[in-house]
Image (cartoon, rainbow, N blue to C red):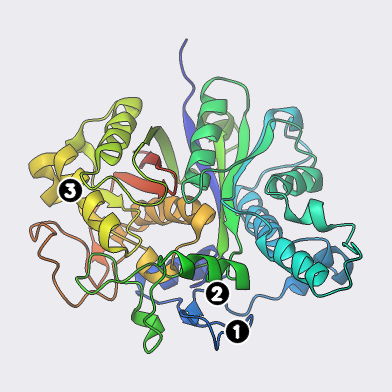
Amino acid sequence: MQLKRVVVTGLGALTPIGNNLQEYWEGLKNGKSGAAPITYFDTEKFKTKFACELKGYNPLDFFDRKEARKLDRFAQYALVSSDEAIADAKLDLDAVDKFRVGVVWGAGIGGLETFQNEVIGYASGDGTPRFNPFFIPKMIADIAPGNISIKHGFMGPNYTTVSACASSANAIIDALNYIRLGHCDVVVTGGSEAAVTIAGMGGFNAMHALSTRNESPETASRPFDATRDGFVLGEGAGALILEEYEHAKARGAKIYAEVLGGGLSSDAHHMTAPHPDGIGVVKVMENCLENAGLKPEDVDAINTHGTSTPLGDVAELKAITKVFGEHAKNININSTKSMTGHLLGAAGAIEAIASILAMEHSLVPPTINHSEVDENIDPTLNLTLNKAQEREVNVAMSNTFGFGGHNACILFKKLS
């Protein structure tokens, strides 16, 4: 069968460096760091005392008090970002066939704060199980797309993808395929996460995953730098409206980019560590190129997973060199996690958006905080260090990997 073409017609962002799409782009192009001391709880006894929290976010700007109490922060973020994307796409909700509009959302953890608070409340009591009646519906990861669907009456496919930090990239690829195969005209997709909590910080600290650069939080996320010591936890959401090309064209929609393809693979190596030779990462990029019908030399920019961990950054760059060969030197490679931190299940969404905006503005955002060369990294690669670089970007790749060995890769193309 002839696969349908899929395009992006709306974007929404709620991130540590900007609370809407325009603010997010301003933060990206200016190399803004979202890392700062944690304000949500007392970090005195924590090894890491900083994160990339949202700045100036007030749920009462978007929800009434009663509604806000029923929603974990990760679900709030999903609604806020998806509302922006729907408005950006200028979807006529009265005219669209809502049976052909789906919501496929990514969340690696879901309502962690809700779970944490309810369990702490029980443990500090007399043993009587006094749980909030909204405990379960606030916590479950699938409630985010459920709420988006309920709010707008979308009655197509509706579910959450959970693949750790690859969750929202998986969601975008699933959304792509539903439209390609003719099952949907429009899919609201993306991801959200709100893991900057006592449990989140404590858990990631226990596994030695987080940077402990407490004396300089704003420089702690330093992908590819020789002194990197772990990732910086972030929170927020990104939303994309994927639409069948003819459907978008018929209503005169603005088209940001075409989604050419998606690739998936598994490391099959370790619960948390990447394969040192990046075998799964090589395969996911090869799968994505094949799925998109592109050659390696077609790619202009790669937004890497680039978390700022000692093992992961090196493995990914080795994989890029293997897949792209000499052409790797012509690609602008960057890691926007240097600015936003790692949004876990929402990472793939906000980084896909960053890739699309790089194409739209012909500007590749920087990898900030780089000061010392890592001898294990090929010095001929252009890692877009410390300052945004102007260039024409016609094809952009976005890589996202997750604990458990989950690998996802997406390719976007500027429409000529």
* In the rendered image, the vertical position of residue 326 relative to residue 134, given as above or below: above
Q: Earlier in the sequence, mark 2 or mark 1?
A: 1
Q: Earlier in the sequence, mark 2 or mark 3?
A: 2
Residue 388, percent from left and from top:
27, 68
Residue 217, percent from left and from top:
40, 83
Q: Residue at x 20, y 44 (%)?
A: 277
Report crowding for label 1: few under 14, some 14 to 19, many 20 or more residues within 10 A (C-alpha): few
Amino acid on which the number 2 mark rests in the picture:
Glu
Q: Residue at x 26, y 57 (%)?
A: 311
Q: Can residue 21 be seen in the rendering of this structure?
A: yes
* In the rendered image, the vertical position of residue 110 relative to residue 170, given as above or below: below
Q: Can residue 13 be seen in the rendering of this structure?
A: no
In contact (CB < 8 Å): disc 2 and disc 1: yes
In the image, 201: left or right of 94?
A: left
Q: Residue at x 32, y 35 (%)?
A: 284
Amino acid on which the number 1 mark rests in the picture:
Thr
Task: Say which of 11 and 133 sits in front.
Answer: 133
Q: Earlier in the sequence, mark 3 or mark 1?
A: 1
Residue 38, percent from left and from top:
55, 82
Residue 247, percent from left and from top:
58, 29
* In the rendered image, the vertical position of residue 265 relative to residue 326, given as above or below: above
Alpha-carbon span between mark 2 and mark 1: 8 Å
Q: Which mark is residue 53?
A: 2
Q: Secondary structure at mark 1?
A: loop
Q: Which residue position is annotated with label 3?
A: 318
Alpha-carbon span between mark 3 and mark 1: 38 Å
Q: Which mark is residue 39?
A: 1
Report crowding for label 3: few under 14, some 14 to 19, many 20 or more residues within 10 A (C-alpha): some
Alpha-carbon span between mark 2 and mark 3: 31 Å
Q: Secondary structure at mark 2?
A: loop
Q: Secondary structure at mark 3?
A: helix
Amino acid on which the number 3 mark rests in the picture:
Lys
